[in-house]
Amino acid sequence: MLVRFLSFVRLVLKRLGLLPLIKRWLYAPGSGQNVARRGWQYRLKLLIEQANYAAVTEVHDLPPIQGYWSNRYILPLIQSFGFTGLDDFWASEVASALGRPSSANGARILSLGSGNCDFEVQLALQLKSRGYGAFQLDCMDINPMMLERGRKAATSAGVAEHIAAMRADFNSWQGAPGQYRAVLANQALHHVVNLEGLFDAVARTIEPQGRFIVSDMIGRNGHMRWPEALQIVEPFWAELPPRYRYNRMTRATTEHFQNLDCSRAGFEGIRAQDILPLLVQRFGFTLFIPFGNVIDVFIDRAIGPNFDPEREWDRLFIDRVHAADIGAMRAGRIKPTHMLASMSTIRTAGTRCPEGLSPAACVRQAEAAP
């Protein structure tokens, strides 16, 4: 019923031509912190965000060209750190936090921004396959419709006893001291307005030897490109035939790359550039795997579907963009926009990370650019 109501309200506003006006008013340029201070504005924005996701069943659905790039370049990077793949990264890091299966009875894990809980259900299956039998994975999300889909998915997969829905807003969640052995954030932090409050709550709520494990976007707010990255994007963009420059989100073909601010249409990337520096201030990194920047423009949902990994020209183009990305990153001219990380509240002597790309070295100082 609520799904239908939210979808109906959104449809009416759209047909009356009011939705764009409301979004421009709500998402005027400014920091996410300013939005948080205007409580009524935040609540209205949150309602529209829930309406946007009410019927979304494939939250992380990405174009095939992203799979080509990820399998060719990111999978080997993850494997170089001893994991067989992304699923193994999550399961291994969580298992490290839990300890031996015999000592993990009653252990609790929290996942922030769980949505439909598809990731959490798969993780529960992975942990069971490793011998963990008595753990609880709390799935936090503000959207009751998505949590209900997650409950049904957990039942279908046979892990309902391990999955608990937890309806809460991570912008105001306080946690409890020593409540969780591990806290997970899988592509959730770039939707958070109150990062400071959330990170402080995570630091309080994990056990002394617990882990905060993250996969997220850490580029410019709204997933925009910084000026130094635009200098690399624009020549590649100019190479593309018009049909490759058709934006599936804006439904427009543009001669020049449009550096759009995604946070103006919701919470997408609202404080992405603050994630890494705030984590560096509060946590000790045991593992940090950074990657990507310029490549994002060409493999995301906007123009990524225009590329076909079965076409040689498309593959070679993506290969060249990736090579330019890596070269500029290693030279220190641009910073990564993605990370996999495992952290604790205890400062460690060293961090496993690519040479020259420590967490601190990958922080992009916002005040250094116009």
Image (cartoon, rainbow, N blue to C red):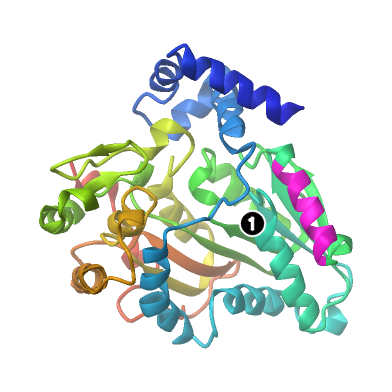
Could you tell me residue 302's position as x and y percent? 34, 47
Range of the magenta residues?
146-157
Could you tell me residue 129's position as x and y percent? 78, 81
Q: Nearer the viewer, residue 367 or 145?
A: 145
When the figure is inspected, residue 73 is found, relative to residue 47, above or below; the finding is: below
Whether residue 215 is visible here, answered yes or no, is yes
Q: Secondary structure at mark 1?
A: helix
* Residue matched to label 1: 203
Whether residue 208 is visible here, answered yes or no, is no
Figure disc tally: 1
Query: Local crowd at mark 1 within 10 Å, few (<14), some, or many (≥20)?
Result: many
Could you tell me residue 183's position as x and y percent? 67, 60
State the quadrant of the C terminus: top left
Seen in the image, is 303 located left or right of residue 57?
A: left
The quarter of the picture where residue 261 lies is top left
Specify whether residue 320 is painted magenta: no
Question: What residue is rendered at 60% in x and 46% in y?
Answer: 198
Specify whether residue 156 is painted magenta: yes
When the figure is inspected, residue 288 is found, relative to residue 280, above or below; the finding is: below
The quarter of the picture where residue 136 lies is bottom right
Question: What residue is rendered at 42% in x and 48% in y?
Answer: 272
**Magenta region, mostly helix, strand or loop?**
helix
The quarter of the picture where residue 250 lies is top left
Q: Nearer the viewer, residue 99 or 47?
A: 47
Question: What residue is rendered at 43% in x and 22% in y?
Answer: 23
